[in-house]
């Protein structure tokens, strides 16, 4: 993920999951270990669309929904895939064999967060390190059903599942036909949280 996406994730995590709409650029800089200039530059597009209001000592999130859809439109999920392979097991068995230190994404994250799924799924997406997962799940030339996404330095701070915002933007950018069912169900669940 690009640095601006890491910033969007933190802003949306604070707004959606922590119900905190008042931050500061300094907080984002320190929390994410990024320079103030990087934070400021990343906020430029959000300011232009009136999704955030930048004051002298604070940052007010005025429209989390705009930020979420903007991030979804610029996200390049395919670029973040560092390893993919075929594992001839049902999805739940693949999930149960994941090593510690991975962060579940997409369909698996939805299932773990909400204890429900809108439809069956067969592809597994996780944020993790290629090396450990390649040893556990050897390379195959058959169509992949396990995708490892590059994990950035702050991915794990949110727990073992992707944040709601990360889940949304990843589902938005997936190729599987049933991603739309998951996305629609997620939009219903978070509709009120975005206001």
Image (tube, rainbow, N blue to C red):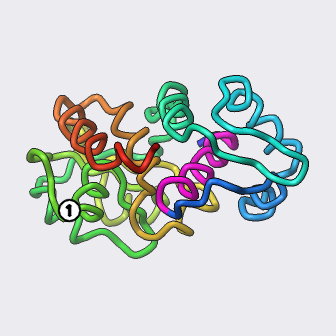
Residue under pointer 1: 94
Q: Tell me where residue 194 sits by quadrant.
A: top left
User: Residue at (79%, 45%) from the top-left corner?
Assistant: 39
| In the displayed structure image, the side of residue 138 where residue 9 appears, left or right | right
Quadrant in the rendering for residue 179: top left
Q: Which residues are magenta?
A: 2-17
Q: Out of 178 and 83, give the one closest to the viewer.
A: 178
Q: Is residue 144 left or right of residue 135?
A: left
Q: Position of residue 45 (x, y in %)?
A: 71, 27
Q: Is residue 14 magenta?
A: yes
Residue 60 in the image: above or below residue 127: above
Q: What's the residue at 86%, 51% (across, down)?
A: 35
What secondary structure is the stretch in magenta mostly built from? helix
Q: Residues within 10 Å of mark 1 (few under 14, many from 20)?
A: some
**Quarter assignment of residue 24:** bottom right
Was residue 6 drawn as part of the magenta stretch in this picture?
A: yes
User: Horizontally, is 96 left or right of 138 in the view?
Assistant: left
How far across and how far down the image is residue 43, in percent?
A: 74, 36
Near-viewer residue (7 or 55): 55
Q: Residue at x 55, y 49 (%)?
A: 12
Identified at 59% across, 42% down, the residue is: 1
Q: Total of numbered circles in the picture?
A: 1
Q: Residue furthest bottom?
A: 100
Q: Is residue 72 above or below residue 27?
A: above
Q: Measuring from the top left, give residue 136's x and y in whole percent.
A: 31, 66
């Amino acid at each position: 993920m690009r640095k601006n996406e890491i910033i969007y994730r933190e802003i949306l995590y604070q707004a959606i999951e922590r119900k905190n709409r008042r931050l500061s650029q300094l907080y984002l800089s320190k929390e994410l270990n990024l320079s103030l200039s990087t934070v400021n530059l990343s906020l430029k597009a959000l300011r232009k669309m009136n999704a955030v209001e930048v004051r002298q000592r604070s940052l007010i999130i005025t429209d989390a929904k705009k930020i979420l859809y903007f991030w979804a439109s610029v996200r390049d999920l395919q670029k973040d895939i560092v390893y993919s392979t075929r594992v001839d097991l049902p999805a739940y068995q693949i999930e149960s064999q994941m090593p510690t230190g991975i962060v579940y994404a997409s369909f698996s994250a939805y299932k773990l967060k909400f204890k429900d799924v809108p439809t069956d799924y067969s592809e597994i997406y996780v944020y993790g390190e290629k090396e450990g997962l390649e040893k556990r799940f050897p390379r195959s030339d058959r169509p992949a059903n396990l995708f490892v996404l590059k994990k950035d330095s702050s991915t794990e701070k949110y727990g073992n599942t992707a944040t709601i915002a990360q889940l949304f933007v990843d589902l938005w950018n997936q190729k599987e036909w049933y991603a739309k069912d998951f996305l629609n169900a997620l939009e219903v669940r978070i509709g009120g949280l975005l206001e």
